[in-house]
Amino acid sequence: MTIEYTHPDDLVGPAHVKPVPADVKTGQSLLYRIEARLAQVVSVGMVVASIALGLLMAAQVLMRYGLESPFLGIEELAPMLALWAYFLGMIYATREQDHISGGIVALIFKNRTVIQCIRLGASLACLLAVCVFGYFALNFAQFNLDLGRKSIYMRWPKYLWDFSMVTGFTLMGFYYCLQIIADVRDLKNGPNKQ
């Protein structure tokens, strides 16, 4: 795991965690190989869910206006696919550190250690928020699982929708843990530049 900045002499721009180092190809780290596979599954799932959602919308338009025979199950499938695409996208954005950031900290503070401490604090705050939201998502999924709720038209179990949130927050928490480890290593090993 390495931290790369947009420029080695300053800290303008976010720290990017590259969770899969180059030595994975040599087979030295099982954890990183598993993480690389997980990232592939997440990215493929995100693309498949997005494409399926687009095709589903096109099919609905064709069936409703072209054939004048709408399929009501699409009203249930579309939100499910949208949820999975959204939460898989959140996981992927967390892994790649592609969140929107302003970089104002580097404009206010010039001390590298202070900036790294602020970034570590931000990563800890993000992990805390993900854990809180994940807790409530898990409780909601468990509630629907215990009730055995099903969708109205398709009669699919409601936990298919709920587990998108549980999966999303769990894997985001995993990637924030990796980010925190990288931030601590960077803070510990990095030189204090003014």
Image (cartoon, helix red, strand yellow):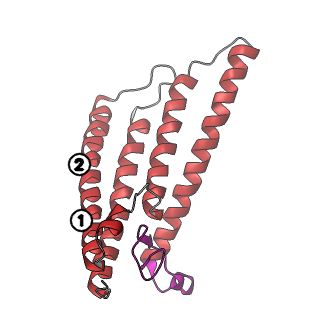
| Viewer-side residue, 19 vs 74 | 19
Amino acid under label 2? Val
Residue 96: x and y, percent?
48, 63
Q: Amino acid under label 1? A: Gly
Q: Position of 69 compared to 134: left or right?
A: right
The image's mark for residue 160 is none
Q: Is residue 97 above or below residue 54?
A: below
Answer with the quarter of the image where residue 128 lies: bottom left
Q: Is residue 132 above or below residue 1?
A: above
For the residues carrying marks 2 and 1, which lies nearer the camera in this image?
Answer: 1
Secondary structure of residue under mark 2: helix
* Residue found 57% across the figure and 25% down from its top: 74
Which segment is the magenta one? Answer: 1-30
Q: Residues within 10 Å of mark 1 (few under 14, many from 20)?
A: some
In the image, farthest residue toward the right: 66
At 34% from the left and 54% from the top, the residue drawn is 170
Main SS of residues in magenta: loop
Q: Earlier in the sequence, mark 2 or mark 1?
A: 1
Q: Is residue 58 above or below residue 96?
A: above
Dot 1 lies on which element? helix
- Residue 79 position in % (x across, y down): 49, 31
Q: Position of residue 89 (x, y in %)?
A: 49, 50
Q: In the rendered image, which quarter contains the C terminus?
A: bottom left
Front residue (pair 69, 4): 4
Quote the CA–CA distance across marks 2 and 1: 17 Å
Residue that carries the numbered disc 2 in the rendered image: 132
Query: Can you identify the residue that label 1 sits on?
Result: 121
x 71%, y 11%: residue: 68
Give coordinates of residue 47: x percent, y percent.
Answer: 60, 49
Mark 2 burial class by Cα count in 10 Å: few <14, some 14-19, many 20+ = few
Residue drawn at x 30%, y 70% is: 180
